[in-house]
Amino acid sequence: MHTIPDPILRSSRLKLRRLCPLDYAPLYALANDTAVTQYLHEGAPPSLDDVQGRVARAAAQWEHRGYGMMAVEDDSGFVGRMGIFHPAGTPEPLLVYALCQSAWGKGYATEALPLILEWMHAAHGIEQLSGHIDPRNTASARIALKLGATRQGTVERAGAMLDLWLFRPTVQPFL
């Protein structure tokens, strides 16, 4: 069990918070948008029951590790999911995100990802996080470069070869 309080991370335009049952419908829509998921390699589009199971597993990860997936909100409400995915039996956590098409091109990823990196460093002492980016996903590669991430080679996941990026916090922790 973790003892670190659940964060609510904020920037001037965004709020990041733990996923909850209120997120089932927007997560379902996000996970079933083929434009959003084309580079995620997460398997077949999930049913609503699958989404509920994912949120339950995310909650268990929060309880076990003290970090996990978060909802991203702007003034209009839910605009995506972002956070740390750390499956049991894997050595390191992964930084992952998916934003609704309505949030694309607004700089939300470059605004929100540093919040997570800084919080993970301050709250958990984690110096770097890995990200797996499909080499065809040039938008995510540009975001990684903007955030100072470095490409470290490739990894295989779900039958796809993905670029391995290492992300580090770039400013002083806020906690």
Image (cartoon, rainbow, N blue to C red):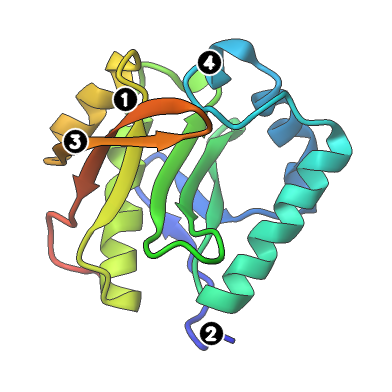
Front of the two marks 3 and 4: 3
Judging from the image, what secondary structure is the residue with disc 2 in?
loop
Judging from the image, what secondary structure is the residue with disc 1 in?
helix
Judging from the image, what secondary structure is the residue with disc 4 in?
loop
- For residue 175, say whether it is visible: no
Please provide percent x and percent y for residue 35: 55, 11
Is 115 above or below relative to 74?
A: below
- For residue 55, say whether it is visible: yes
| Quarter of the image where the C terminus is located | bottom left
Residue at label 1? 140
Q: Residue at x 53, y 15 (%)?
A: 38
Q: CA distance from mark 3 to mark 4?
A: 21 Å
Front of the two marks 2 and 4: 4
Q: Are marks 1 and 2 in contact (CB under 8 Å)?
A: no
Upstream in the sequence, badge 1 or badge 2?
Answer: 2
The kind of residue on which mark 1 rests is Ser
Is 53 above or below relative to 159?
A: below
Upstream in the sequence, badge 1 or badge 4?
Answer: 4
Is 3 above or below relative to 23?
A: below
Q: Residues within 10 Å of mark 3 (few under 14, many from 20)?
A: few
Instruction: Pick whichever, 44 or 2, lies toward us.
Output: 44
Instruction: Pick whichever, 168 or 162, lies toward us.
Output: 162
Q: CA distance from mark 2 to mark 3?
A: 33 Å
Front of the two marks 1 and 4: 4
